[in-house]
Amino acid sequence: MTNDLLLLWLTALPLMASPGPATLSLAGVGTAYGFRRGLPYWAGIVLGTWAILVLVASGATALILAEPALVVLLTVAAAAYILYLAFKIATAPVGSRKAGDETAPAFAPGLILALANPKAYAAIGAVFTSHTLIAGDAFADAAAKIAALGLAVVVFATVWLAFGSVFSRFLADPTLGRIVNIAFAAMLLVSVAFAVIGM
């Protein structure tokens, strides 16, 4: 089982930890607001992704993805929020920040983005269905994969938020800080373009 678990995590790494709407938004929030102020948003992303794990395990995702109108609705909802988030990140205070400069994205927006992120359904579905941890017991296998991938979600989300917050510590120069915030916002916009093209 140890080898199967390692293979599961190795498969999850490029599919679930790669740049996409949720991961790039975490990095952008970390850059614009810092690690601690980004934690409520991080919690929303993590909980929403765990919910997708449960949907995948229960087979409900197949029903969602089989309905083109729902896929379009999810993609449009995610794209709309990412556009808003890109604006918030690009215009966030830079340089020397005070604790109350501007409200960082909260738990609910992170949860909504995670649940509306079409990349998450596809990536988690691919990882979940391509591996078996406990042969001969579908329920135990599903529970083990939910636990293993749930841990991976926490690690990946934390790394992306921390990655962004590392930039925030070195961006005392307002011009450089603005450039980095705009760069993260632009990457989010590119992720929206790919999501819309893939509809």
Image: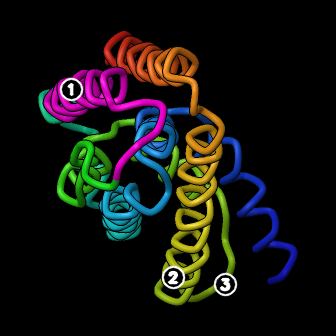
> Of label 2 and label 1, which has the lower sequence position?
1
Check disc 1: other Cα within 10 Å, few if <14, some if 14-19, many if 20+: some
Mark 2 and mark 3: span between their CA atoms? 8 Å
Q: Give the alpha-carbon distance from disc 2 to disc 1, as whole Å.
A: 41 Å
Between 4 and 45, the residue placed more toward the observer is: 45
Mark 3 crowdedness (10 Å alpha carbons): few <14, some 14-19, many ≥20: some
Left-right relation of 164 to 44:
right
Is there CB contact under 8 Å for labels 1 and 3? Answer: no
x, y (%) of residue 88?
Answer: 27, 29
Residue 79 covered by magenta stretch:
yes
- Distance from label 1 to label 3 (Cα)? 42 Å
Nearer the observer, disc 1 or disc 3? 1
- Quadrant of residue 192 within the rendered picture: top left
**Which residue corresponds to the image point at 45% horizontal and 14% vertical from the top-left?**
186
Q: Amino acid at mark 1?
A: Tyr
Residue at x-position 35% and y-position 32%:
93
For image coordinates 56% across by 47% down, the residue present is: 165
Q: Residues within 10 Å of mark 2 (few under 14, many from 20)?
A: few
Residue type indicated by callout 2? Ala
